[in-house]
Image: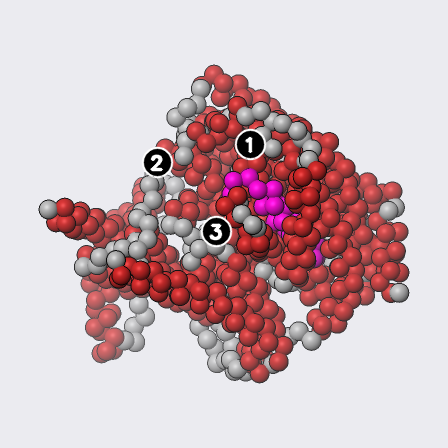
Amino acid sequence: MDIFANLAHGFAVALSPINLLMCLIGALVGTLVGVLPGIGTIATVAMLLPITFGLPPVGALIMLAGIYYGAQYGGSTTSILVNIPGEATSVVTAIDGHQMAKQGRAGPALAIAAIGSFFAGCVATVLIAILGAPLTKLALAFGPAEYFSLMVLGLIFAVVLAKGSVLKAIAMIVFGLLLSMVGSDIETGASRMAFNIPELADGLGFATVAMGVFGFAEIIRNLDHGAEMNRDLVQQKITGLMPTRKDLADSTPPILRGTVLGSILGILPGGGAVIASFAAYTLEKKLARNPSRFGRGAIEGVAGPESANNAAAQTSFIPLLTLGIPPNAVMALMVGAMTIHGIVPGPQVMQKQPDLVWGMIASMWIGNLMLIIINLPLVGIWVRLLRVPYRLMFPSIVIFCAIGIYSVNNAPVDVILAGVFGLVGYWLIKHDFEPAPLLLGMVLGPLMEENLRRALLISRGDWSVFLTRPLSAVLLAIAASLLVLTVLPVLRAKRDEVFTESEN
Amino acid sequence: MADTMGHSATATRNTRLALGFCLLAIAPQIFELIWSIGTIFGWGIGRGPAAVVTSHAAALLAGAPSAIFGSFGGGAKKASSEVLLALIYSYPLFVVAILTLFMTIRSAQDYVGGVVLMAVALFALWAGSDLQGMRGFSFGAGTAPRMFGGLLVALSAGIALTGLLTDGPAMAHYSWRGPLFVMAAILFFALAIRPLGLVVTAFASFMIAATGSHETRWLEAAIVGACLTLGCAILFPYVLGLPMPMFPRFLIQ
């Protein structure tokens, strides 16, 4: 079997002592930095990127993958404990996880998150090994038109699964697309919407916008409520760090469902992990016998999304390795890291550098295993973080975020921009706009524009190319039907509301 | 009685909203004016405040109207950036502000959200107006920004319309203390990290941010801030190897 030979080769690469050490260091450092409140996955990976520069490519990527998982786990830890999701994927975890922490069940919440992530990681690793090669062949059939349609589909998925108004979610995506166009034009090099500010010539960084819209905005919003919501938390006694048998039994089905859902959604470009965690949460809530428990500390609300986002995070390597599309901001950073090491992600990587690809896939599994070994004993320590009152926590978070952003490019302007986006994020929250689709639009914007331009150039300006090429037409049809399916119930509900009003 | 009172209340709020939108309509001009004040003291480059005021006033009051009516005659002359700003950004928002006076707003949250987002989109359209458009069937640098800008204008108009047609929440309450001090801390950090170094900056920013909550205890905050600064000073430059100045520049030299 080809796949197993490949996997075995990968494990041989990943299990070499040096690479094992890289993986361990990556996972450990990723967790430690990711756990700092306000510094989410994106910032952690961006901050730690420089330490991998001096390593050989395989070791560097293995370490980066370790940092990524570590950061992701560290990120869910902070969102459970202090309700500050460092990035979009842990927003959902924070909803029920933080409630569990308030009830003194932070330990089980963290442990279930780790166990769910590990299980999902195992499944996803196998999936990547199986699907990687066939998808590479499919990738060759993908022209610019198909890429564009695929990204439209990914964005529509984000709209469908976002909560709240469809119109607002789409508007947020377009806003994100517009923001992604600030900076130099890819083809002509013209400076766009940069107002002659040299720091804007390179465009707005994902990490900067993400940190502003999620990090700073969240802090400001929490200050609105005052610290009363955090005060009751400190007095709570923390009981039992390990999940009980009932917890495990309750969370097994959500973990399984989350894994399946996450693996499928992760393959789609468009912030797979974000969509997956939202989708898993919605699914669990719909399937639950008593949906009102959700938002009040239901363990299913932690288990499902956490396994889904980990599965998706891992399967989102598939589009990166096969199509060369970074499906989310972290993957975009990975592309940057690969380019620095002289590797161009895309269909040819699998054939040209099997050591790298399979070594990295194998190291993902090892990284996940290491994470669970590192983290289960540490749960007790993380839980102590809860005892720090918010009035001391939030200035620390501000400082960590500021240092984090500054260190990405050593640019003070980035810090100011993140502050401005913090205000923008605060405004968005106040007007019930969701920031997650905005970030997705920003991540996919440059690629969408490039492929749109290329597709139209090849077709000599004929827009029908998106419908005449079969693959592209199918993708767009799926996107359209998804959108219609989402809008229809909303319209009907509106009409019902109107009717009930007129009856009164 | 209650009905009239309710009605007059919405009327005053609409006037305030309309005034707010008018202010939003000339926000970029005001921003440039504030920015230009710095040139008096020799900071930065650009025009002085007097030049900014006259050019924008001329564009708003004379240039843009004549561009609208004059385009039928001989529209060969290229409009200046101020006139374009007035035409693309300010005028549509003035129109929205005037329309606001005559509307019953059923969900202020959606209506204001939509209008402000529209302002952002219009501003982006203006910012991209100097870029080249389509060249034959190939995209210019400005095509995609214009496309998505136009789309965002349409979508935000839709959101504003939702605010008029369906009931929804009113404006949320904004507080000023948290945002103000957190922003001040961020701004201070950005401006001070290069000249003053990590140690001074981190501690000072910590204290500024701590002012944002009304239940800060000063002694406690100072102690925690000092510990945090020490931790950061060890963690970031040494453990993670990030290049960062540690102490104020004038102390080292």
Q: Secondary structure at mark 2?
A: loop
Q: Secondary structure at mark 1?
A: loop
Q: Amino acid at mark 2?
A: Trp
What residue is at 36 percent from the left and 63 percent from the top?
A: A496
Single out the residue that lies furthest toward the top: B219
Pointer 1 chain: A
Single out the residue that lies furthest toward the left: B1
Please tell me the numbered disc located at residue A435.
3
Q: Amino acid at mark 3?
A: Pro
Q: B17 or A46, which lies in front? A: B17
Q: How many marks?
A: 3
Please tell me the numbered disc located at residue A103.
1
Q: Nearer the viewer, mark 1 or mark 2?
A: 1
Q: Secondary structure at mark 3?
A: helix
Label 3 CA crowd tier, 10 Å (few <14, some 14–19, many 20+): many
Instruction: Please say whether residue A316 is one of the residues in the magenta stretch.
Output: yes
What residue is at 41 percent from the left and 31 percent from the top?
A: A226
Q: B193 or B204, which lies in front? A: B204
Q: Is residue A490 left or right of residue A41?
A: left
Pointer 2 chain: B
Q: Is residue A251 left or right of residue A189?
A: right
Q: Is residue B139 above or below residue A420?
A: below
Q: Amino acid at mark 1?
A: Gln
Q: Is residue B143 above or below residue A429?
A: below
Q: CA distance from mark 3 to mark 1?
A: 28 Å
Please tell me the numbered disc located at residue B176.
2
